[in-house]
Image (spheres, rainbow, N blue to C red):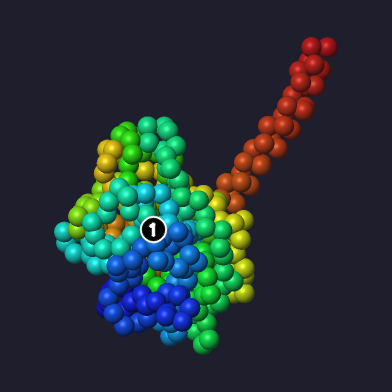
Amino acid sequence: MTTSQFLKLRRSARCGAVSLLAVAPVLFSLPTKAWGPGASGANTTPSFHLASPAPRSAAGPGGVNIGFDFNWNNGPAGYTASFIESVSGTGATLNNCSGPPPLTSSSTSCDFAFSYDIGGVAQTAVASGGAYETWTPPGAGGRICDNPPVNTAPLTLFDCFNTDSFGQIFLASASGALSNVTMRMTCLNPSGLALNGLTALIYQINPVAATIGATPLAQVPVNLSSCPTLTSWTGHTFTAADFASIPLNFSGVSVTAGNFYGVYFAGLVPGTPPPGGPPDVTTLTPVPATIWLGLLGLGAVGLFALWRSRSRGAWLPRANAGRDL
């Protein structure tokens, strides 16, 4: 069952809120009306939340998770948060916050906090929405990401309402080399093992069908060493300080004004990998003890060599001076 097959948006006639129900086919695609602050006829403080119980992506390997800062308000035109709905040999279909295709240059919707440059010039960025949750773990009485009563961050790769990967679509307003791509992340790592295996991929988007092709324009390992990390999120109330802008250093990617592009993730993600991406990471790999012992041994040898060189430097001049006398 895909993400779009078990989620449906319903508006409550009583309070004007929007809830997600596990019954029918739509994730963010809101029919007929535009939802968000200032939209005609829309709730000015929309509340997307999950009914309980609700399907969710599995827990991450070793309990790890990666959360993304998010803005539920209508963001820059031509941008949208995007979820991979299904993957085939020819590419993948997308389920976008902007609604059913086609994407247009005037589409506005919810977005991940995101920034990038084209030709060395900073482009319109998505700021954080500034609304954060207190994390309640899934399970008996627990909820998953985006706790009610208000839309919140983080949205997480694991234990969230996605079944596969997600990412961010943007409309290039200039042509040139893409650089300085960042997304704001926070990390959960109970094991303390190296948090690696996340890969970022970038694709050109087909706006008519809201699809991506079988081959990304580029992909790059994501260095999470600067990601703010906790060993437990239970009961933790997130703030802006829990997130850092993590660089996604794509190489050799040029974009063309007027085209849509999307950044998605693979490796350390649930479900089916995005097209052309690496397989899912199922376990975190500890650094072997033999490597640590080898490093300690090299350190000891280096210290001994330093001691010997300093010792010789201390007595050789005196010996030479004695012979000169």
Q: Residue at x 66, y 41 (%)?
A: 304
Closer to the camera, 302 or 323?
302
Amino acid residing under circle 1: Ser
Question: In the rendered image, which quarter is residue 1 located in?
Answer: bottom left
Q: Nearer the viewer, residue 146 or 73?
A: 73
Q: Which of 56 and 323 is in front in this view?
A: 56
Dividing the image into 4 quarters, which one contains the C terminus? top right
Q: Is residue 22 above or below residue 219?
A: below
Residue 68: x and y in percent read 48, 60
Percent position of residue 322, x then y:
81, 17
Secondary structure under the numbered disc 1 in the rendered image: loop
Residue 201 is left or right of residue 300, and the answer is left
Residue 224 sits above or below residue 142 on the image: above
What residue lies at 27% left-to-right and 51% top-to-bottom? 104
Q: Residue furthest front?
A: 41
115 to 40, vertically: above or below: above
Q: Where is residue 207 in the image (x, y as percent from the top left)?
A: 23, 53
Q: Can residue 267 be seen from the camera position used here?
A: no
Q: x, y percentage for residue 88?
A: 19, 64
Quarter assignment of residue 250: top left
Q: Which residue corresponds to the image point at 45% horizontal and 75% vertical from the top-left?
A: 16
Classify residue 192 by image quadrant: bottom right
Q: Residue furthest bottom?
A: 140
Which residue reaches farthest top? 324
